[in-house]
Image (tube, rainbow, N blue to C red):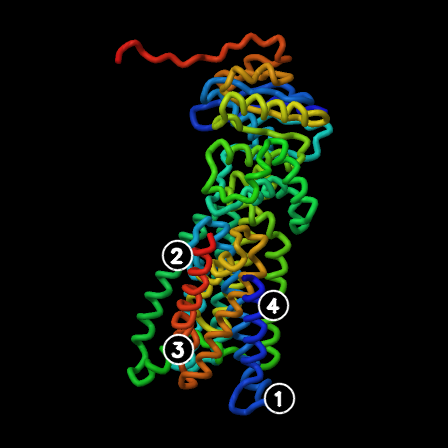
Amino acid sequence: MRSVLYLLAVSLLFFNLLWGPAGLDWGVIEAVRLPRVLGAVLAGAALSLAGLLLQTALRNPLADPYVLGVSGVSALTALLSYLAWRFFHMQYVGYLGGALAGAAAASLLLLTLSTRASLYAVLIAGVMTAFLTSAVLQLLLMLLPPEELGYVYLAMQGSFAAYPPGAVGYALALALVPVVAVAWRYSRWIAAYAHGEEAAAGLGVPVRRVNVLITALAAAATGLAVASVGPVGFIGLMAPHIARWSAGSHRFDKLVTPAVASGIALALLADAVTRALLPRDVPSSVVMSLVGVPFAVALFWRYVRGV
Amino acid sequence: MYVEFNVVKRLGDFQLAAKGRVEEGVTCVVGPNGSGKTTLMKILAGLLKPDSGRVEYVGVSSRVYVGDFYTPPEATGLDVVLAGRTRFGRRPVGREDVEKAAEYAELLEAADLLKRRISTLSGGQRQRLVIAAALASEADLLLLDEPLSNLHGDWRGRVMEVLRGLSRGRLVVVSTHHGDVLKCCHYVLQMENGVVAWLGPSADYQPRLAEAECGGSR
């Protein structure tokens, strides 16, 4: 089952890059399709990893990267930077600039908290932040004139097409590599959390330090994803489960690669469907659930029958 | 090879003030509930810091404590035993880890449980897997907190025999409420009200473990 997932991810990668109205024109590939594909790959890999980290560390199959609040703060600061330009004629740093600043700030706050308090406390703080930023965001949107509101609202939906092209895009994608590498390196320690934090400590895991590490990795991955493509749902929650079903295991150290692969496969699938069937400006996050749910159901069916 | 301790720890109303020494071999830790067995073991494991005093480890380079060990229902027996080897976690799970896991599971007659899901196993079977996990750690100092609680008399004896066999060049500390296993230990450490009430070779120990009494009324 795992190999099916890897095969799907790789074939979708090539398909999304090489298929399109302009055919195999390298200029078009680089300028139009590559950023979208990179966006899908980055968001898929990052959100899935973050989801897996949180579900493992919190021993909660419903944990999702958005409970960290990083996404909420990031969207809020992105909107604030737009409003600052719109109403106060400040320099516009773009969605990416505003979002990255917010993601970084939120991550730092979570990190600081994780050095002083339990993971549970970090989770609650993240959830409260998510609620708060969501409410403030809605209020701020009401400041906009109605004719602009629709456009801005749509622009704030996650979309792989919004991924920054060129060097910035490559840099962001590269920044995820050390995050995945570190998660993989410490995966056996993180896997021990499945037995309880106290059990993990008894087995030799330096739990206080690894809590900080887990927070840092999850926040960094989520931040990179939401800053570059905006909020995309479903992957963070479901890709880890899809990984479990296809790997036939619940152990973290066996799931890192399958989770990254399933996140990438889901994202690329959604992007392919968007490009093939829908008008160009439908945000990917909208399609994500429509595509993701049947995919997940099909895999879950096979898993349940096999267990 | 030994661990010498002289520690004080306050937890709420309870105070532990324990002094003693754990030698090579199997030490049974006994005492009433709340007497400080777990507290002492956690301090020796390095999981709790004493408020004052110190623990001296001589010839002990690794320590593992296994107490409340949640076994996820979807995990396999192998997953649980491999967890015991977490301290080797800097390397990905390799063939050696799996072989050692099988070896220690075999010692506890749990080799056929490795492929099964925890949800399909009885409490005693899960407990044997957890003990196998602890053994698979191959730590110099092994602290097992009430590992025999779910096990039938026959099994208690067999597990203690395995522990005895593996205790050469190792310090194995086992806490228990069962008096019948004391003869399987080399030493007995009795805790009472947070102090070490007795410590010495098990052959010299006069068991003072309380027996349950039910009232006469129906």
Q: Chain of mark 4?
A: A
Tell me which numbered mark, 4 or 3, is placed earlier along the sequence: 3
- Residue ID at (54%, 85%): A19
Q: Of callouts 1 and 2, which one flags the residue occurring earlier in the amino acid sequence?
A: 1
Marks 2 & 3 on one chain = yes
Query: How far is the residue under mark 2 from the one under mark 3?
Result: 25 Å
Which chain does tag 2 point to?
Answer: A
Q: Quadrant of the N terminus of chain B?
A: top right
Residue A139 lies left or right of residue B137; in this view the side is left
Looking at the rendered structure, the kind of residue marked 2 is Val
Q: Secondary structure at mark 4?
A: helix
> In what quadrant of the picture does the C terminus of chain B appear?
top left
Q: Secondary structure at mark 1?
A: helix
User: Do the CB atoms of the residues marked 4 and 3 lie less than 8 Å apart?
Assistant: no
For the residues labelled 1 and 2, the Cα–Cα distance comes to 44 Å
Q: Which of label 4 and label 3 is nearer to you?
A: 4
Q: Is residue A179 left or right of residue A78?
A: right
Disc on the earlier residue, 1 or 4: 1
Measure the alpha-carbon separation of dots 1 and 4: 25 Å
Kindly identify the residue that appears in the image at 33 percent across and 75 percent down: A141
3D distance between C-alphas at marks 2 and 4: 26 Å
Q: Which mark is residue A175?
A: 4
Q: Which residue is mark 3?
A: A83
**Along the line of sight, the residue nearer the viewer: B213 or A65:** B213
Q: Which residue is mark 2?
A: A127
Q: Are marks 4 and 3 on the same chain?
A: yes
Tell which of A114 and A214 is nearer to you: A214
